Image (spheres, coloured by chain):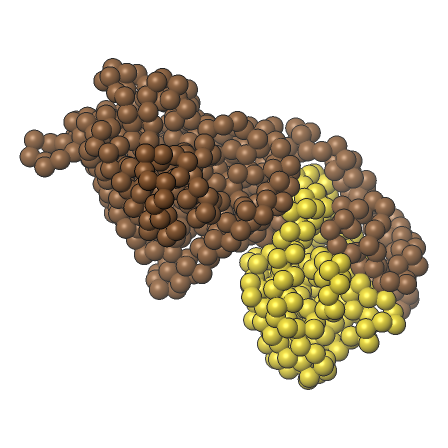
Chain colours: A yellow, B brown
Amino acid sequence: MALNDNEKRATPCVGLFVTCVVDTIRPSVGFAAVKLLEDAGCRVVVPSQTCCGQPAYNSGDRANAKAIARRTMQAFADCDFIVAPSGSCAGQLAKHYPELFADEPDMAMRAQAFAAKCRELISFLVDERGMTSVTATYSGLVTYHDSCSGLRELGVKTQPRKLLESVEGLRLLEMEESETCCGFGGLFAVKYGELSGAIVTEKCGHVVASGADTLLAGDLGCLMNMVGKLQRQGRRVKAYHVAEVLAGMTDAPAIGEPREAMK
Amino acid sequence: MSGSVTTPRFKQNAHDALGDARLQRALGHARNFIPRRGAAVERLPEFEALRDSARDIKNHTLAHLDLYLEAYERKVTESGGFVHYARDSAEACKIFLDLAKARGAKSVTKGKSMISEEIGLNQAIEAAGMEAVETDLGEYIIQLRHEAPSHIIAPAIHVTRDDVEADFRKAHLHLPADRDLSQPEQLLAEARGILRNKFLNADIGVTGANFLIAETGTSIIVTNEGNGDLTQILPKVHVVIASLEKLVPTLDDAAQLLRVLARSATGQDMSVYTTFSTGPRRAHDPDGPEEYHVILLDNGRSAMLGTDFEDMLRCIRCGACMNHCPVYHQIGGHAYGWVYPGPMGAVLTPSLIGVAEGGQLPNASTFCGRCEQVCPMRIPLPKMMRHWREREFERALSPATMRYGLKVWAFFATRPWLYRASTDLAMRALTLLGRKKGRFSWLPLASGWTEQRDLAAPQGATFQAQWRAKSGATQ
């Protein structure tokens, strides 16, 4: 059934682009996103999907990046919005798909129209749906890392902090250099492992110095990189995707923690 | 260029740099530029508008570069100077040496110039039996150390105060061995004393140029030490060595670019000296050189016009990109293996020495985008690094394992059903494997990750599988 504009505004159909990392490693982030989107009055659908194509795009493999982008655009064609719990993947959809097809005028127009509907989850909730608070509890001292693509490509900065303020029992301790890259960079973390390791070591120093017991961010890739290093260093800092905390869904073990420990 | 090109060994260079405790100590200073730039930008409400204007000025100049080059040459000639065009490094060095030999020059003083580094001028001068003396303090230090600059505006940023003291004691043997050099001011005073004589005895002074003005035929240098002024005013001959893209149409344009340059570079509103030179000394001038020459270097730049890399020609060499780069912060400039380090070097180096040799650099980026965020000329550095990766991929220069891996991955990623089934199966298996610890400290095929950090184990079935089971979807 086609909705008219007013109905769309009231109950937009949001296609959840869950991202390949959340899909495979941490589905709980996907369910947290669904809860937040439904709380914000959206109808959520999950079209069959794979990846945004960023690994190919950033490796210079334009042909495969395009093939994946074409599929993604097709799969989400009927959605009013396409929302991803990741600044990096949302940035790929919203900023890089049009660039990717710059040399194909027809596709470029389609990519632009598609891109205009793509959003990062938390900024969508605040900027588009007017969400000002959440009903959630988390007792802990948290620090928040501004993931690069969300911050610089999509302007995600104040929105997560604003919603975190409303979480009962949570206190936000800002770390130094919260806007400095964690060294993840997708395939960079593997291709230039040692360099990536050095960057994330410095980053972890800031996380620990903040005095927080919990690390949050809007991108699972960055979180896995940072908490993976913290765990390797033997630090007891937990990490959750910010959506999990905002949705009050922190029952699952923190990232990289076993089922029973660290309760 | 000074020394050999080690760019293809970037990974090894980076490894060495990470293990160099002395270097790591020195690199702490590179981070100090960040708050300084931030404060300078904060003080100037129109900074963002100035960046737009700066970008537009350079874009306009590049679109009409031929006209502005002609206009510039005409003005230099009118003011009594000479313009020499050099296609490449060898030609530029030859032009300079011919000039120097014809004048019987023995000693050449030099202001700081990256173009001089690019063409390897010091080596050429010394090979021709003349003395080249760097007069910028940082450049003087690294010349003593037989090193290349590790930063385009702070060439000796990789050196500590202790290093400088040791270098000075080794080089300045005519001075008392028991002299006190414990304070930076004492080191500065010693360098000053030595350089004073060099300035007075030089036959030729060489400077670079931050801008060349077509309207007036003027070259501009910005410095903080005043060495540039003494270099270009005291000797009988002043030779400016600059690349084509330093050109701007008018004095007003140069003034606008100057407003973003120092703020982006050191966080100063203006550098201490901003020196304009137009032609040789005129009859009523109290001082100045008798001859004024400009060597204009192309060295691959004109071939960048009209390509994906043209935007790079807007660069005004402020260094903000490297000052804010997480990769540069870890390894410093020498690891990049050629003249230009950091994000601007990662884009420019493959343009100038070829992607086959320089291809490592545009790959060694997390694409965090902070360089583009601070670039006063709004150069889309990450985008251009990606263009280089595409060139590499097209020419099959990227590693075979990566290409093969991408191919396999893309096969699945373009077949959603197959992708969902196989990832679900793989994740269930991995979940079982990682159940106990919740993470892996080692995993076959993922050692690139687990060498540095633990890898979180999956939670179980994939999100898509769970969602489908929940909603009863069958697609």
Number of numbered discs:
0
Q: Quadrant of residue A204?
A: bottom right
**Residue B65, how many percent across, how many down?**
35, 33
**Residue A100, how many percent across, how many down?**
62, 44
Q: Quadrant of residue B361?
A: top right
Q: Quadrant of the C terminus of chain B?
A: bottom right
For the point 85% across and 63% down, the residue is B438
Vertical side of B215 occupied by A212: above or below: below
Residue at the limit of the structure toward the front, as seen here: B178
Residue at the limit of the structure toward the left, as seen here: B284
**Residue B96, how many percent across, how many down?**
32, 21
Vertical side of A8 occupied by B382: above or below: above
For the point 81% across and 73% down, the residue is A262
Vertical side of A168 occupied by A1: above or below: above
> Can residue B281 be seen in the rendering of this structure?
yes
In front of the other: B16 or A181: B16
Residue A49 lies left or right of residue B44; in this view the side is: right
**Residue A12, how many percent across, how many down?**
69, 70
Vertical side of B223 occupied by A248: above or below: below
Q: Quadrant of residue B10?
A: top right
In front of the other: A30 or A188: A188
For the point 23% across and 18% down, the residue is B103
> Can residue B292 be seen in the rendering of this structure?
no
For the point 32% across and 38% down, the residue is B175
Residue B56 lies left or right of residue B82; in this view the side is: right
In front of the other: B67 or B281: B281
